[in-house]
Image: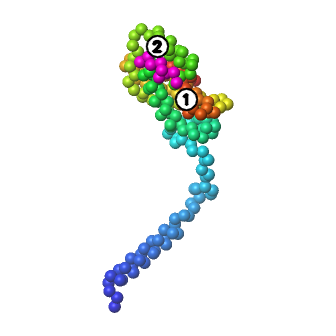
Amino acid sequence: MPDSQTLILVAAAMVAAVICFRLYTVLGRRTGNETAQPQPMPLTAAPPPEAVPATPASNGLLDIQLADRAFDTPKFLLGARDAYGRIVTAFAGGDRDALRPLLSPDVYAAFEAGITARTAPPAAFVKLQDARIVNSALNGRLAEITIAFTAEFSSGTVTDVWTFERNLDSSDPNWQLVATSGDLPE
């Protein structure tokens, strides 16, 4: 007579076989709620949805990304946040050498005039609270992205709207500040 361990093992194997068979017959069946064809994956690597809200700026970002495959929206925003801090700190300190490569000639001239005309020290930059893309466009090979920065200074909270520009044919990967404003574009 077979021992009891062998009988238990055979019974467990039979239960496992029945469960596996039931799973096999159920899994993989269509219920009618799914699409018949799998959806193709996009050919370009799009930024995650939380990084770029669906706004009119998204079309310009897509145009820029298609024209420059190395463009990465989250990486651009990190760089813009860093540039904002560097620019306002250099402006407050009157550091013209630090400002020159970050600004277009027109914006540099305005910043230099502001430094020269200053009679009191400017409010100290405390922290950058938010940076979001509010507009973007590709004009030929010239990419423009406008960002609304909300920053805290020792005098209070400020919203700056800055436009950065880059020629996509240039070997220089850096963007330059080409316009500043305190108003959000409509």
Q: Position of residue 134 (x, y in %)?
A: 54, 29
* Residue 5 visible in the displayed image: yes
Residue 36 bears which disc, if any?
none
Kindly identify the amino acid type of the residue bearing the numbered disc 1.
Answer: Trp
State the SS at label 2: helix
Which of 128 and 156 lies nearest the eye of the viewer?
A: 128
Q: Position of residue 162 (x, y in %)?
A: 53, 24
Q: Are marks 1 and 2 in contact (CB under 8 Å)?
A: no
What type of secondary structure mainly makes up the magenta span?
Answer: helix
Q: Residue furthest left?
A: 4
Figure quadrant of the C terminus: top right
Q: Residue at x 40, y 22 (%)?
A: 125
* Residue 60 visible in the displayed image: no
> Residue 85 is drawn in which quadrant?
top left
Q: State the CA–CA distance, disc 1 to disc 2.
A: 23 Å
Residue 175 bears which disc, if any?
1
Indicate whether 35 appears above or below 177: below
| Residues rendered magenta in the picture | 92-101
Crowding near pointer 2: few (<14 within 10 Å), some, many (20+)? some
- Residue assigned mark 2: 115
State the SS at label 1: loop
Which badge, 1 or 2, is on the more N-terminal residue?
Answer: 2
Indicate whether 50 appears above or below 153: below
Which of 102 and 84 lies nearest the eye of the viewer?
A: 102
Q: Residue at x 58, y 56 (%)?
A: 34
Q: Position of residue 121 (x, y in %)?
A: 39, 13
Crowding near pointer 1: few (<14 within 10 Å), some, many (20+)? many
Q: Residue at x 42, y 74 (%)?
A: 16
Kindly identify the amino acid type of the residue bearing the numbered disc 2.
Answer: Ile
Which of 125 and 135 lies nearest the eye of the viewer?
A: 125
